[in-house]
Amino acid sequence: MKARPISTLQADGAVREQLPEIFVVRMSELWELGRHIQFEDRVRELHDMRIAAKRLRYCFEFFSPLFDEEFKLHLKRFKQLQDYLGEIHDCDVWVDYLRAELKTAMQGINAARRELDTHVGASQGLAESAREMDELYTDGPVNGLLRMMTELSQRRRDIYQDLLLFWRGLEEDGFQQQLALDVAHAATRAAGQEPRVPDGTEDT
């Protein structure tokens, strides 16, 4: 997922005053992807959300000297969000790897099955081929790969449920709005102005 460009920034402008322009884009990226979070099987969108959360967190960390000390609590919540999304992504990556390994392992079994078709009747040759195929199932990697895929899928399911509860908690706490207010406060604090919410942030 590519970051959206921020075309309104001025090279000679004060960094603090341009914080709303920076963060309204980065926050919108994350919360627009947040609408996919209720769909467990949207692997690509959840991966993009992980990237957007990481990008926004790093942005806040980079500008952290401009924020109040209590802002560190927000960063902890970002870290937890990243952890959930990262673990889900790890499960997806591992399952894809195991699926490829299973395909390779099944090639040997399929070859053994085709060997069975070359025999006529209950011949000794068929018995040997059947024994070879049984060994591939019993001693080969297929059972282990299937078991690992099942366990990873269940782990992903459990983490996803935790993520869903965590995200709903953020929404109930007004986390997005609080971040927008903190950004506005950091942008105007030096000039003694009243904080302003960046346009469009509350609607994303």
Image: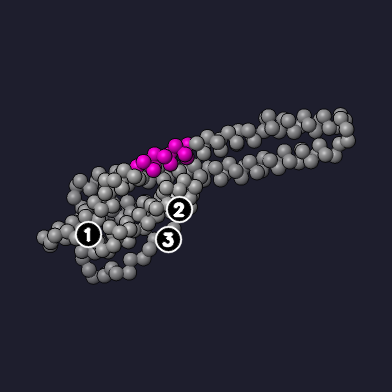
Q: Earlier in the sequence, mark 2 or mark 1?
A: 2
Residue at 60% across, 33% down: 144
Point out residue 95 in the picture as x, y percentages from the top left corner.
54, 42
Secondary structure found at label 1: loop
Q: Which residues are magenta?
A: 155-166
In-image side of 41 versus 185 (left or right): right
Nearer to us of marks 1 and 3 is 1
The residue lying toward the viewer, choosing from 18 and 163, is 163
Q: Which residue is mark 3?
A: 2
Give the amino acid type for the residue marked by disc 2 in the picture. Glu
Quadrant location of the N terminus in the rendered image: bottom left
Q: Which residue is mark 1?
A: 197
* Label number found at residue 45: 2
| For residue 88, above or below residue 141 | below
| Residue 23 visible | no
Q: Please check the rendered image and state whether residue 190 is part of the magenta-colored stretch, yes or no.
A: no
Q: How is the image coloured?
A: one colour
Residue at 72% across, 38% down: 109
